[in-house]
Image: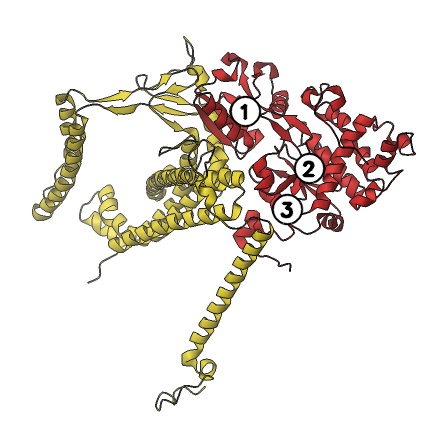
Chain colours: A yellow, B red
Amino acid sequence: MAMADQAGNQPAFRLSMLIYDSRYRSLTIQAVALMLFMLAVAWLLSNAASNLAALGKPLGFGFLSQPAGYDINQRLIEYNNQMSHGRAALVGILNTLLVAVLGCITATAIGIIVGVLRLSSNWIISRLMTVYIETVRNVPVLLWIILTNALLIESLPKIASFRGKDPASDLILWDSVAVTNSGTFIPSPVFGGGSGIVIAMFVLSLIAIVFFGRWAKARQAATGAILPTFWIKLAIFIIPALLFFFIMGRPVTLEYPEMARFRFEGGYVIRNSLISLWLALSLYTGAFIAEAVRAGIQAVSQGQSEAAFALGLRPNKTMSLIVLPQALRVIIPPLISQYLNLTKNSSLAIAVGYMDVTGTLGGITLNQTGREMESLMILMACYLSISITVSVFMNWYNESIKMKER
Amino acid sequence: MKKTIIFGAMAVAGMAAVSASAATLDDVKAKGELACGVNTGVVGFAAPDASGKWVGFDVDVCRAVAAAVLGDSNAVKYVPLTSKNRFTALASGEIDMLARNTTWTFSRDVDLKFTFVGVNYYDGQAFMVPKALGVTSAKELDGATVCIQTGTTTELNLADFFRSNGMSYEPVPLDTNAENQKNYLAGACDVYTTDASALASSRATFENPDDHVILPEIVSKEPLGPLVRHGDNQWGDIVRWTLNALIAAEELGVTSANLAEMSNGTNSPEINRLLGTEGSLGEMLGLSADWAKNALAVSGNYGEIFETHIGESTAIGLARGLNAQWINGGLIYSPPFR
């Protein structure tokens, strides 16, 4: 192929060069491929639209503003059955986000602990962690969700056993928490007059903790003296807020769950559907994260920890100051995809009756309105945007902890 | 113009409506079997027996249609469907008909585009509670936890009932009858609500049926019947008149015992038209002349099917009630075979 000699005296552009000239050929191929792809998509869309029209179901999103007519047990925002399908979908999205966020946090904690312990020099502990990882991640997550739910339902006491004069089961933690097989009832805070000041104080002490942490770090860098930061931070965390709590005359009180005719009223309820989904997703994803953590730690050269030991750092300091920060660079990318997996796996929620967006929009709304195409399109858009948001954020975080090469 | 669709996820969603308006009768004949959507397991209505064979009140409707169309009552592919995915399966053409305790409502008929060909069981929504709870009326259920099958009319009726009575409740939405029973028996919910017939069916399978009571209130009308897609009237007619043949046979006194004898010709012109010895009703449907005879040969007439699967002699023990023939004061009524 003659390309070297053409570079010298630029010949006029001819159409045949789109194919025969390697400078343009790849562009041509890409353009053609793109056009074919667009045509295929257009054909699929028009096909779906014409088939839907033939069925007498033209595409339309008007159903979202019609009253939903069904109730949802777990609502993070105001909702009743007279509100619209759109509102019900929003309740579902928030429920999805709730379980995804809770799940990601606990899965990360489990993953880091298990991943580190798997490398432990203690034979029993490391083998136990291996068994945990291999059993959990080699069984489909749906089974874990159903199993957790079944265990909760069958093993915890019924609400009925809390009823009556001499109930078979009692509330725990000074009569404040009821663990039952339909959910755990906990007290909720009631904010009386003056509680604003207590909360403001609490926020101030959180800010103070951040500043104290920075100051202690700078001081250590400058002088080498180490402060017992944990205990000082704990004191800042508790003491001012507690002080103002008593000064203001205890404005924040607790509302305890009280047995009504059928169930506990007052306080908050954490339903078993949420607990089992949360627990199963965390344990499952945690096992994968543990493997990522182990890989990350093993990717850090042995010399690093040997050097740290030589400097006299203890094993836990070595781990937290030397090994983990370097391992994070390896851990974060697989961690992102585990977070995405967890979020997507949360769509199995209906197996335990948790009303996530798949349950509301993709379940009841789809079923009651018969709008399969529209519901699924919105559903896909929801998961897509949640996933993209997560990965954009995590990529930004990955960028910020990357080794800075100067 | 008939396009084929390979539509990835969306096809899975069941919108690949290729065969929506094609002739279902030809499809069924070409396949040699009837794809019939049934419940995932409600004893008496549709559930696999100990040998894995599907039996029940709704199953017999499928079998009768298969016998009428194909001459073989076993040429049925049973597709167990949850309340949530049943309509998608029917709309997409995955099944040819749905006989799955499905309530005939305006929006399912008009908006979801399904043809309900008749009613094979007049039902109503009721509540079951453990006797130990000491509840005697559904009006006392303020604050109760209620197990429901998600994606049903039950779910909407429940919301309406509690709202109109100014009561609150905690819904526990679950996918199948089995899940609901498990949660209810474990005490994770105080109440199980669904159609009264399904409650009776569930209760019959409990270890101690007497510990549970079905409250007297019937809070809704639930006319249950088989349904097909809009747009294929011939197929709709076949399913409709097969069901009517079962009903008319009971009224006319045609039973599985005297079927062979009666199909040789009787003095009653209507029985003769029904069984194909007179007139050409089968031909008008596009079926053989003995279509109704084949349908009746499967498990007898409507009354016999009722008694075999859910009647008072069975563990489920449902009385005919509203489902008696109109001549006995019920609502079961077939238009004339003429």
Task: Work out how far the residue at label 1 is from the one at label 2, CA to CA, in angstroms.
Answer: 26 Å
Mark 2 residue element: loop
Q: Of the numbered discs in the image, which one, if any, rests on residue B193?
A: 1
Mark 1 and mark 2, same subunit? yes
Foreground: disc 2 or disc 3: 2
State the image quarter where residue B276 is shown. top right
Mark 2 and mark 3, same subunit? yes
Disc on the earlier residue, 3 or 1: 3
What type is the residue that disc 3 sits on?
Answer: Glu
- The residue beneath circle 3 is B94
Q: As drawn, is B325 to the left or to the right of A124?
A: right
Answer few, some or many: residues within 10 Å of disc 2's Cα (few below 14, many 20 plus, some between 14 and 19): many
What type is the residue that disc 1 sits on?
Answer: Thr
Q: Is residue B223 visible?
A: yes
Task: Work out how far the residue at label 3 is from the one at label 1, CA to CA, in angstroms.
Answer: 29 Å
Q: Residue furthest left?
A: A223
Residue B49 image offset from top left, x and y in percent: 69, 30
Residue A169 vs A86, above or below: the answer is above
Task: Work out how far the residue at label 2 is from the one at label 3, CA to CA, in angstroms.
Answer: 19 Å
- The residue beneath circle 2 is B117
What type is the residue that disc 2 sits on?
Answer: Val
Residue B282 image offset from top left, x and y in percent: 82, 42
Answer few, some or many: residues within 10 Å of disc 3's Cα (few below 14, many 20 plus, some between 14 and 19): some
Residue A363 image offset from top left, x and y in percent: 50, 39
